[in-house]
C-alpha cells in the first residue's frame, strides 16, 4: 500500500506547497480572462484566437462557476491531475518491474521540478501529462491483448490529450506509432490484428487534435514569437524541459539506460524520445519548439529511469533518487517565488499603490511579440482600487472577438493628466516603444519619464507632464 500512497502523497504535498506563492503569469492570466467571459463571448473569441485552448477554457469555466477564480482555485485542478498522474506512473513502474520499480518511478516523477511547476499552472498541461500516462498504459495493454475495452480506453486517452493540447497529442501519437511499428517488426508472421486495432483506436483518438488544429490553423501568429532551434536551444534543452539542467540530465541518461527490447519498454521508449526528437527537428525550420509542448514524454521518461535504477539494486537506487531530490531543491524553491512562473505580477500593487495620486491615469502598449494581453490583465487583477483609470480603453480585452482592448483612436481621449503610468511586459529603455504611432506621438509630445521599475516580464514607468 505504501508504494502507491507515498509517491502520490509527495506529489500532492509538493503541488500544494506555496501554491499561491508565484503570481499568475501571462498564460494563466489568459485562462483567468477567458473563464470570466460569457459562453457566447468565449465562442466568439475562439474564432479569432486561442481556438486550440477553447476546450480547456470551457472545462475551467464550468469548474470556476463552483470554485471561483482565486489563484488557488485556478491551480487546484492541475494539482489533482499531477497527483493522479503520479499514481498512473507508479502503476506503470509496477507493471514493468514490480513494487520496487513502481515506487521508484512514482517518487522520481513526483520530485521532478517540472512536475511541480505544471501542478501549479492554471493551464491544460497537467491534464495533458495525466492523459499521456494513461495513454501509454493503455497502449502497453492493447498490444498485449487488443480487447475492445483497451482499445476504447486508448482512443479516449489519446482524444483527451489532443483535445486539451493538439500539438502534444499529435507528437505523443507519433511516438506511439513508432513504438507500434518497432514492436510489430519481429511479429509480422503472427498477423496484423494488434496493429489494425491500434490504427483504429488511434484514428478515432486523433480526431479532436486534428479538428482543433484545422480550426486554429489561421491563428499561427500565436507562435510566431518562438525562436528556431539552434545549438543554444539544444544545450538548454534539459533545463527548459525539467526546470533543472542537473535533474534533467540525470533523468535523460537513466531513461536511455532503462530501454530494453521487451514490448512494454518499446512502448515507453517511443513515448519518451520520439516526441522530443520530432519537435526539435521541426523546430529547426518552424516556430514550434517550446519545451512545454512535449510534456507528454514525462511519464515514460520517469518509468524508464526507474527501471534503470531498479537494475542496480536497492541501495544505489535510493541514493540516486535522494540525489535527484537534492539537485531538484533549488529549482523547487525558485519556481515558488513571486516571479517563479517568469512574470512578477504581484509587483504592480507595491509600485503603483503607494505612489498613486488622484488625476493619474494608466496606459498600455499596443503590441508585444508573445504576451500583449498581460499588462492589462496584471493591472486588472493585481492592482486594487483606488488606482489610475485605464483612460484610453473603450472596450475591455476579449470582447467582440478581439483579444486586446479597444482604445480610442490615437489616444484622443487621453486628456491632459498630470502623470501617466505606463505598464508593459518588457524592460525596454523606451516605455512607448510598442505603442501605435499616433498614441506614441501624443504622449511623447507632452510627457517625460520620471521613474522606472523593472521586474521579470513587468515594466512600470511613471511619466510626468512637461507642458
Image (tube, grey):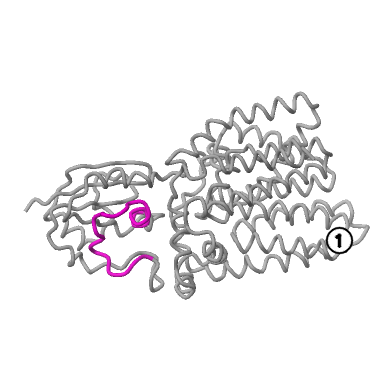
The single residue placed furthest to the left in the displayed view is 467
Would residue 285 be seen by someone viewing this image from the given angle?
A: no
Q: Quadrant of residue 355?
A: top left
Q: Quadrant of residue 41?
A: bottom left
* Apparent side of residue 396 relative to residue 199 in the rendered image (left or right): left
386 in the magenta segment: yes
Front residue (pair 218, 373): 373
On the image, the x and y values in percent for residue 456 come to 38, 42
* Apparent side of residue 152 relative to residue 391 in the rendered image (left or right): right
Q: Residue at x 79, y 37 (%)?
A: 101
190 in the magenta segment: no
- Is 286 placed above or below 23 here? below
Q: Residue at x 67, y 52 (%)?
A: 130
On the image, the x and y values in percent for residue 230 come to 51, 43
The local crowd at label 1, few if under 14, some if 14 to 19, many if 20 or more residues have their Cα within 10 Å, is some
- Is 7 placed above or below 164 here? above
Q: Residue at x 83, y 45 (%)?
A: 95
Would residue 127 be seen by someone viewing this image from the given angle?
A: yes
The single residue placed furthest to the front in the displayed view is 66
On the image, the x and y values in percent for residue 73 come to 52, 54
Q: Which residues are magenta?
A: 375-397
Q: Secondary structure at mark 1?
A: loop
Q: Which residue is mark 1?
A: 146
The single residue placed furthest to the right in the displayed view is 190
- Is 432 placed above or below 302 here? below
Front residue (pair 362, 215): 362
- Total number of numbered labels? 1
On the image, the x and y values in percent for residue 260 come to 81, 40
Q: Quadrant of residue 305?
A: top right
Amino acid at each position: 500500500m505504501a508504494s502507491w500512497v507515498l509517491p502520490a502523497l509527495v506529489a500532492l504535498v509538493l503541488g500544494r506547497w506555496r501554491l499561491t506563492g508565484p503570481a499568475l503569469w501571462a498564460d494563466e492570466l489568459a485562462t483567468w480572462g477567458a473563464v470570466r467571459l460569457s459562453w457566447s463571448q468565449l465562442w466568439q473569441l475562439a474564432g479569432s484566437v486561442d481556438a486550440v485552448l477553447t476546450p480547456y477554457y470551457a472545462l475551467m469555466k464550468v469548474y470556476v462557476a463552483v470554485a471561483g477564480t482565486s489563484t488557488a482555485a485556478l491551480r487546484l485542478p492541475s494539482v489533482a491531475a499531477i497527483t493522479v498522474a503520479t499514481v498512473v506512473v507508479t502503476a506503470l513502474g509496477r507493471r514493468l518491474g514490480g513494487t520496487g520499480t513502481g515506487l521508484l518511478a512514482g517518487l522520481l516523477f513526483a520530485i521532478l521540478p517540472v512536475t511541480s511547476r505544471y501542478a501549479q499552472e492554471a493551464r491544460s498541461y497537467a491534464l495533458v501529462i495525466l492523459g499521456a500516462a494513461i495513454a501509454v498504459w493503455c497502449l502497453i495493454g492493447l498490444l498485449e491483448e487488443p480487447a475492445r475495452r483497451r482499445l476504447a480506453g486508448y482512443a479516449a486517452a489519446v482524444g483527451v490529450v489532443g483535445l486539451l493540447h493538439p500539438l502534444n497529442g499529435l507528437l505523443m501519437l507519433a511516438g506511439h506509432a513508432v513504438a507500434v511499428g518497432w514492436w510489430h517488426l519481429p511479429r509480422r508472421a503472427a498477423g496484423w490484428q494488434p496493429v489494425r486495432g491500434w490504427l483504429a483506436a488511434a484514428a478515432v483518438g486523433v480526431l479532436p487534435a486534428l479538428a482543433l488544429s484545422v480550426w486554429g490553423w489561421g491563428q499561427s501568429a500565436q507562435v510566431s514569437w518562438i525562436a528556431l532551434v539552434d545549438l543554444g536551444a539544444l544545450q538548454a534543452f534539459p533545463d527548459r524541459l525539467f526546470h533543472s539542467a542537473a535533474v534533467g540530465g540525470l533523468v535523460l541518461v537513466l531513461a536511455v539506460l532503462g530501454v530494453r527490447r521487451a514490448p512494454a519498454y518499446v512502448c515507453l521508449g517511443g513515448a519518451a524520445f520520439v516526441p522530443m526528437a520530432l519537435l526539435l527537428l521541426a523546430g529547426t525550420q518552424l516556430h514550434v519548439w517550446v519545451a512545454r509542448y512535449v510534456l507528454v514524454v514525462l511519464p515514460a521518461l520517469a518509468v524508464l529511469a526507474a527501471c534503470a535504477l531498479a537494475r542496480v539494486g536497492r541501495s544505489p537506487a535510493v541514493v540516486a533518487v535522494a540525489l535527484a531530490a537534492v539537485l531538484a531543491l533549488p529549482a523547487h524553491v525558485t519556481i515558488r517565488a513571486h516571479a517563479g512562473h517568469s512574470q512578477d505580477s504581484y509587483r504592480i500593487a507595491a509600485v503603483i499603490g503607494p505612489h498613486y495620486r488622484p488625476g493619474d491615469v494608466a496606459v498600455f502598449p499596443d503590441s508585444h511579440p508573445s504576451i500583449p494581453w498581460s499588462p492589462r490583465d496584471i493591472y486588472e487583477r493585481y492592482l486594487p482600487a483606488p488606482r489610475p483609470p485605464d483612460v484610453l480603453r473603450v472596450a475591455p480585452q476579449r470582447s467582440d472577438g478581439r483579444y486586446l482592448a479597444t482604445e480610442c483612436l490615437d489616444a484622443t481621449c487621453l486628456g491632459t493628466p498630470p502623470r501617466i503610468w505606463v505598464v508593459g511586459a518588457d524592460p525596454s529603455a523606451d516605455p512607448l516603444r510598442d505603442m501605435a504611432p499616433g498614441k506614441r506621438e501624443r504622449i511623447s509630445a507632452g510627457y517625460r519619464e520620471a521613474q522606472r521599475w523593472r521586474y521579470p516580464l513587468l515594466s512600470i514607468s511613471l511619466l510626468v507632464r512637461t507642458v
